[in-house]
Image: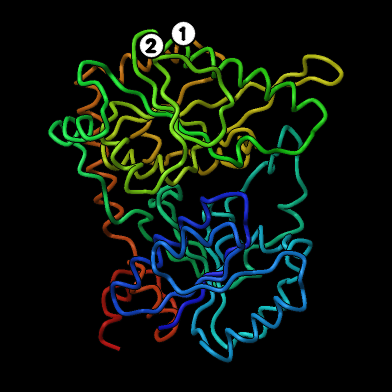
Amino acid sequence: MKVLFVVTSFWAYGELIIAIEFAKEIKKYGHKPHFLIPPRHEKVVKSLNFPYTILIPKASKINRVLLKDIELRIKPEIIILSDFLNYHYCEKHYGININDLEIFSGKVGTFDNFHWELQREAMDTYGFNSNILKNTKIEDYGFKLAPCPIVNPHLASENNQFKYPLIQDFLPYNKDNKEKYRDELGLPKDKKIIMVTSATWQNIHGKYKGADEFISISDKIYESILSDLSKRYLILYIGDEAKYSLNNNIKRITSMATEDFDKYAMASDLYIGRNITSTSMIRLALSRIPCIMLMNSKFSKVGDDVYTYGYYMYPVGWYKFLKPLMEGNPYMDIISTVEQFDKSDVIREVEEMLFNEEKKERIGERIIELKKSLSSLWKPNYIVESIVLGGFKDDKESMYSINSF
């Protein structure tokens, strides 16, 4: 099957990585992925040897010609939007909209990263409630591919939704590899190492009245936590943005290829993140690398123009939006979430995750159980064949009988 992945988000890599993971899996079974991407993602897609077409910013006529060319030249049987929400609002960037998808004769669908049809109080963004939930409906975009985690594999599937395991390949994290990569990377063997990351999109945000002050306060708290931890441990700070003060025990490393990132991860003892939806953290956690997630659930008005807001995805927020997805989710049992304002609790939890072997063993048992649940979900190659050949049935028989077509 020929499968087109339409990626329109140019400032974030999460949606691209989810599409890439799916494409890598279906390619193993002879399916043919093709990517339609912003210029920013060309290096990543090219390095993986996927064929691609580049969208031209602010060029609606050209981009519509590109869509027609893909239909005439490739004729994809399946068209998958990496992020239907971003696509819905991408007209000002690329001049294309949902109506332009009608050029394709294949079946159109999207990734359902957050189980969008769950009942939610709001989509809280930088402390404000967005109208997006009312104005944008995922059901307008065809079938839904729900990667687990972060979608809860135990929740009942929605209509026309395929749950599948996001990660297929796990890191071989163990004592021998930890020592091996510390030697290779020139890292000390006599220190605990904590890895943190900084994504470009987390440092680029719009100006929102009151939110800037909260972001500034949160960054200072985060910097203070890292500074305190660096008195005892080595911090690997991976990212292009030198946003926080560095010292001899905070080693900054610019962004790198996935292979090198994996080596630094396997050389580490702990990962600390601030985005519960991070595909990197999901992969590390399932590979048994201890993970701590800093978050905030405290909402308060400090002054006329200053307030605090909850977040599961820093600095955007999305605490209320993502909370229903977290409830009863087995992924939350394999990582540790700690409130950012409770600094003493953060330090205490770091100590626990670094030194409490019984706790790490309990988490390891939960990881085994979660992987069992994930292994029973749809596989990407079966999904592709089912969409084109067999329709959709959410049961084991349809999942494993597709090869009979």
**Within the image, what quadrant is residue 109 found in?**
bottom right
Q: What colour scheme was applied to this rendering of the protein?
A: rainbow
Q: Is residue 250 left or right of residue 143?
A: left
Residue 391: percent from the left, percent from the top?
44, 81
Disc 2 marks which residue? Answer: 348
Q: Secondary structure at mark 2?
A: helix
Q: At which x and y percent is residue 20?
A: 43, 61
Image quadrant containing the C terminus: bottom left
Residue 344: which disc?
1
Q: Position of residue 202 (x, y in %)?
A: 60, 37
- Between 112 and 83, the one lying in front of the other is 83
Within 10 Å of disc 2 (Cα), the crowding (few <14, some 14-19, many 20+) is: few
Q: Going by the image, does 19 lie left or right of 181?
A: right
In the image, 250 versus 134, the foreground residue is 250
Identify residue type, mark 2: Arg
In the displayed orientation, state which residue is furthest to the left: 176
Mark number displayed over residue 48: none
The residue sitting at 60% across, 31% down in the picture is: 311
Mark 1 and mark 2 in contact? Answer it, CB < 8 Å. yes
Q: How many marks?
A: 2
Residue appearing at x 84%, y 21% in the figure: 305
What residue type is disc 1 on? Ser
Separation of marks 1 and 2 at Cα, in angstroms: 6 Å
Q: Position of residue 142 (x, y in %)?
A: 58, 73
Residue 56 is left or right of residue 4, and the answer is right
Residue shown at 39% from the left, 69% from the top: 49
- 283 up-or-down from 5: above or below: above
Q: Is residue 53 left or right of residue 88?
A: left
Q: Residue at coordinates 74% horizontally, 61% vertically from top-left?
A: 93
Q: Of helix, strand and loop, which one carries label 1?
A: helix
Q: Residues within 10 Å of mark 1 (few under 14, many from 20)?
A: few
Residue nearest the viewer, comparing 157 with 378: 378
